[in-house]
Structures are given as structure tokens and as C-alpha cells.
Amino acid sequence: MAAPIIQGSSYSNSNPESEVGLYKVGPIVMREGVSRQHLWTLFFVSFFSIAMMNSVGIMQAYLFNEILKIPLNEQGSLTGTLLVVQEFVVILLVGVAGALSDRAGRPPIFATGFLLLALGYCLYPLASGDLETIRWELVFFRLFIASGVACIQVMLVSVANDYTVDRTRAKTIAAVFIFNGVGIASLPRLVGGLPQMFIERGIDPVWAGRYTYWILSGICVTLALVLLWGLKPGAMTKSKEREPLLSTLRVGLAAARMPRVALGYAAAFVSRADLAVVSQFLTLWLVQEGMAQGMTPAEATVKATGFYIVIQAFALPWAVVFGILLDKIDRLKGLMIGMGVAFVGYASLGMLENPLSNGMYVAAAFVGAGEMSSNISATSLIGKEAPERGRGAVLGLFSLFGALGIMVVGIVGGWLFDNWKPVGPFLYMAGSNGFMVLLAIGVFITTRRATAAAALKQAATAP
């Protein structure tokens, strides 16, 4: 599941507008000029958006094994390289995409994101040549996918913030995430099953994979057209001018003197990697295992996407349960619990003798709950502890540490996958989440002692 970009709202509601005459969808009240068509278009595209972005990971094992014939001992490192390239491009382009959307409007940038995704998926299965040539071609093609991901991520959050009055903004964003989650929990099985469906109709396995990628490309083009037709033209508001990057980094790093903020940065590094390791390495591992057990790449892809859906199906309802729990306890305790659940999930993968057995369903449920727990708890902690002054800088650095975590898990996870064992990336994440639990306990004890000492000092100096 792709993680949302944390950023401030582009709309300031210092002068609350009258709600007379405004459109409503359930509890959501839209801003002046926003119609039901605009909001339902956003929800429709939200259902497809994350699933379409994640399809690059869902189909990658089939691409490597059936179309490109990448050696098994090279697949982990190639996956890691492509993940690092994508995240680097996203870091570079998210700010540019947001700024351009303020000038050109949200729909053109949103649609451009899907068109870039379509171009990348169209080219991806056409790579050919020796291994080194294929590697460079895939890196080049991934640039289009990464650029599309950057545009889509920014526009999802921006449009959701644009369309609603302040008092129902959280409900709108929650609705967008629900549509994201339902799409992620349903579409991957359809995508992963397409190659096998084509093969059963007598189509060559290579062309079956290419047709699947081109169907994804067609869906992305359709979504771009829907956005251009259905979203409100223009930009609702103009974003404030951004501070220079170095100034933002200085403010954000200065806030790290506060132990809980520093812990939040470390939690971002781990929690965003939790999401990436599942989307990039799970299907790759399970398809290789299926092939070792005599399955074709198409059959193994169907089996692997089934477990991927179990992960997402448990992540969505668990988000509601864990969110309610977090509102009732200290956010630091919530981080301990969240990272602890993630540790159990990833560690359980390493205990499976056969990752395609029924035991995988139980492990997948824990992984789904764990990846959602770690991300919600990390985001909640930084949201509570970020100071009012420099809040944007702290949240921006939180996102930057998350991006770095994804890049590191791409490099380390890829090496472990090829040079140790395919479950290695997940055991790396188990260790990372376990370390975060210990770190959170240490910060909890330290800050509690500091608070108690400050209280005693104040009491001693009181008249």
C-alpha cells in the first residue's frame, strides 16, 4: 500500500464560509463551487489509484520470470534498484507537481500522473537484450512510473483537501483512504490472474504478460480521461510559497532535540519501509517459491496475489480498530504496540516452512495488521509531538525519513533476497520493528523520568 504524503492543507479556513446552498454527500460538506460529480470522481479514482501504482510490484515477479527471464539470484537486487530509483524520483518531483497544479489546475496534473503510469506500463514488458541492457531499460521505463506516482500521490491529498469545508476535511480524507483500501484489497487478484486467464485461452505466456501490462495501461488512460471530465477545473487555492529546502531541514533537525520527535523520525524510516517491503518483495518471494514447487509463473502469481489480498484485507479493518485504540492511550505506548504487532507479523514469515501453505494466511493477517499499525502509530506520534512553530518542517522531514527508509530497504532487502534467502527482507523489517519497540520503551522511560524530575524541581521551588 502506498503511503500518503504528509503535508499541510492547502486551504485555510480562517473565515468559515456559510454552508447554505453547498452540496453534501452524507456527512461531507463541499466547498462553494464543488459539486457531487467532482467528489464522486475523486472517490472513483481513489478506488483505482493506489492499486494501479502498486501493480508494478504485483506483476514484477511474472515480468522477471516469464517475460525477461531474469536469473533468480539477480531478481532481489534488481527489485531494490528499481525501488530506489522510484523513491528518488518521487522525492524530487512531489514539490514540483504540487506547484504546477497551483498554476495549471489539479485535473491536468492528476491526469498526467496516470498517463505517465500508462506509458511506463506500456513500455515495461518490452525490455529486451542481455541482462545489463534490460536493467538499464527497466530503470528508464521506471522513471515514467515514478513520475506518475509522484503526481498521483500529491493530487490525491491536494484534491481531498480542496473539496471540503474545514469541519469535514478529515471525513473526506478518511473516505479517500477507505476507497484506496477497498481497491487495494480487491484489484490485485484481478491483475495477478490476468496472465493465467490469457494462457488458458491459448495465448503465449510472454504475450499474456504483455497484454496484462497493456490492460493496466488502458485503465490508467481511462482514469486520466475520467479526471479531466469529472474534476473541478483549476485549483481551489494557491499554496503558500515554500521555504527553501535547507531552511526546512534546519528547523526539522532542530526539533529532533525533543526525544519524541526524534523517535518519530526513526519511526517514519521503519514504518514506510514496512509498506514498501510488502509491495515489492512479497510477490517476488512467493512466485519463486511457487516455481520451485512446480507451478508456472502465472499460477504462482495467482497464488501470491491471494496472500497479498489477505494482507490488505486485514489492514483495512485493523486501521479502524487501532485508530480508536490510539485515541485512548499515550501515542508513545501506541508506537510500542504498533511496532510490536509489525515485529510479530514479519517474524512469523521467517517461521514458515512452506510460505504457500495455510499457515501463510495467519502470518499474512499479522503482516497486514502490523504494517498498518506501524504507519498509523508513527504518523499519530509525529502529529502530536510536532511543535506548532516549524510544524510543516517537522512533518516534511518525517516524510523525508520515510523515503530514506524505503530506499534503504530496497538496497538491503534486495541484497538479502539474492545473497541470503528470499525471506531476508522481511526478517530485516522484523529486526527494525523490534528495535523500534526497544527504542520507544527507552524514550518512554527517559521522558517520564525527566517529567517527574521537572515536577519535583517545581514543587521544591514553589513558595
Image (spheres, rainbow, N blue to C red):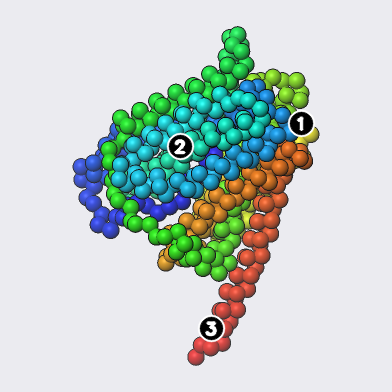
Q: Secondary structure at mark 3?
A: helix
Residue 122 in view: yes
> Percent from the top left, x then y, of residue 87?
54, 44
Residue 227, compared with residue 101, is above or below; it is above
Question: In percent of the image, x 67 and y 52: which residue is there?
Answer: 432
Q: Nearer the viewer, residue 231 or 451?
A: 231
> Percent from the top left, x then y, of residue 58?
59, 30
Kind of residue sitting beneath label 3 = Gln
Q: Secondary structure at mark 2?
A: helix
- Real-space Cα separation, disc 3 to disc 1, in angstroms: 60 Å
Q: Earlier in the sequence, mark 3 or mark 1?
A: 1
Q: Earlier in the sequence, mark 1 or mark 2?
A: 2
Q: Which residue is mark 3?
A: 458
- Does residue 41 appear to the left or right of 187 in the view shown? left
Find residue 148 and name its label. 2
Q: Nearer the viewer, residue 325 or 412?
A: 412
* The quadrant where residue 206 appears: top right
Question: In percent of the image, x 65 and y 56: which residue is there?
Answer: 436
Q: Earlier in the sequence, mark 2 or mark 3?
A: 2
- Mark 2 vs mark 3: give the one in front: 2
Kind of residue sitting beneath label 1 = Asn
Q: Are marks 2 and 3 in contact (CB under 8 Å)?
A: no
Name the residue at the left extreme.
21
- Mark 1 vs mark 2: give the one in front: 2
Q: Nearer the viewer, residue 270 or 59?
A: 59
Find residue 46 and name its label. none
Q: Which residue is mark 1?
A: 354
Name the residue at the right extreme.
353
- Does residue 415 appear to the left or right of 443 in the view shown? right
